[in-house]
Amino acid sequence: MDHARADFLAARDRLTRFGWIPRNAEAFRHLPPPPAAAWLGEETETAAPSCDAPPLSGAGWTLHPLGQTPQGRVDARWLDAADPVQRSELFADLPMPVYPDGVAALSDVSERDAAPFAWAHRALCRRGLRLRVGGADPASRGEAETVWVQLRHQPRSAVEAPMLVIEVLAGVHCVLVEMHDREAVACEQTVAQNLRAHIRLGAGATLQHLRSVRPGSADRVAHHLHVQLGQGARYEQGLIATGGRYHLQRQVVELEGDRAVAHAAGLLLAAESNLEQQVRMLHTGGHTVSNVEVLALASGAARAVVNAHTRIAPGAADAEVRQRLTGVPTGGQPKLVLRPHLEIHHDQVQAAHGATWGALPEDALFYARQRGLDERSARGLIIEGMAHALFTRTFDDPQPIESLDLAGLVRQAVTRHLADETSANSASQENQHG
């Protein structure tokens, strides 16, 4: 039986019967996604003549060492979802996409809204990677086993649905750098990418996860991460993301085990582009802790949206949650939407949330200019400082920040943002005088 074909037909049937994400869907109403045809490769748009498919082929997921850091055990399986046996292995033990037949029973409106992305992914997924991090025998591992991994992904085709599954074994400390950089590909063909990642942390495991996602200006990208934390597990994510024609970063983190901890920080930079981050923290275990902090910068006619939603279930006693969203327009007239939200079903919790919107601090700009910096360099220096403080608060262990050249990644992203802003301003002035 052709399981890939069967999944495709099933997903197409559901999309036909129940439709794509409506424009008034609560989770997506500020930045509606492109239609289903964009993610299924059914649009009439043609590829740019300067690039054919061959430069994109042969890419996908690749593993790389991280500098001089010691490499622990990583079992990696690259799987072809077109093969029935490998497809079964790729999707083994993963939650099935939420189908409309059971949507009425779901209390999570956001999951209902996002379900069509899952159907489209199951229809088009042809390749994936499964990683098992840590020693094979828990008894043979040292208490402080640390595994350093760098993971890169480049598009394989103009329309794709990659899959990533990561299991961090109990007691293992993993540092993972995940890179998605379209500038590294000498190809102007636009990409529609619907990526899904499933991450599981065993009891006492720690994952420090740095993600850098920089799509092309005309790309449409939707990344969906589903993270499950066991007892005493700790997950720290730092995201650096730039805008595109459409760019969605959506993370759902389930703190299932008692005393699980999750921190998520995002640096979003949208210059004449679109970018949205959705973070959902779901507390079901007792004594769990979560922190969501996002710094969003936008310029020109950009649209940047941050949706943060934390839910504390009835049984999640002594949960501690915090949300802090900051939006800064750096030029032009961008649209910035910040939406913090707490859903609390237990009396014994500590919770705080807030959102601030405003310009870069004038006093900091003044003092930076007094040091002889031009305005663009001064603004870049201030933004880098804000980003450094953001990630320092997120990563409990400062070693990844020092070892992974996080400052360099931030500097590259900020420099690109300010350069794109300057180019857009120049083009606008030329049009006005023209």
Image: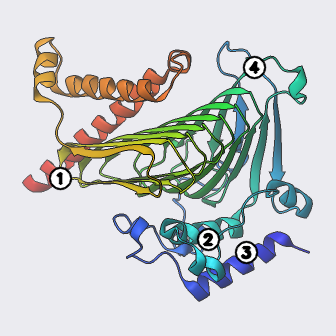
Image quadrant containing the C terminus: bottom left
The alpha-carbon separation of the residues under discs 3 and 1 comes to: 41 Å
Tell me if I can see residue 250 in this picture: yes
Mark 2: amino acid: Leu
Which image quadrant is residue 7 in? Answer: bottom right
Looking at the picture, tell me which residue is in the foreground, 5 or 251. 251
The spot of residue 411 in percent (x, y) is 38, 26
Crowding near the residue tagged with mark 4, few <14, some 14–19, many ≥20 C-alpha atoms within 10 Å: some
Quickly name the residue at label 2: 40
Label whose residue precedes the other's in the sequence (1 or 4): 4
The alpha-carbon separation of the residues under discs 1 and 2 comes to: 33 Å
Quickly name the residue at label 4: 145
Crowding near the residue tagged with mark 1, few <14, some 14–19, many ≥20 C-alpha atoms within 10 Å: some
Quickly name the residue at label 3: 8
Mark 3: amino acid: Phe
The spot of residue 58 in percent (x, y) is 73, 46
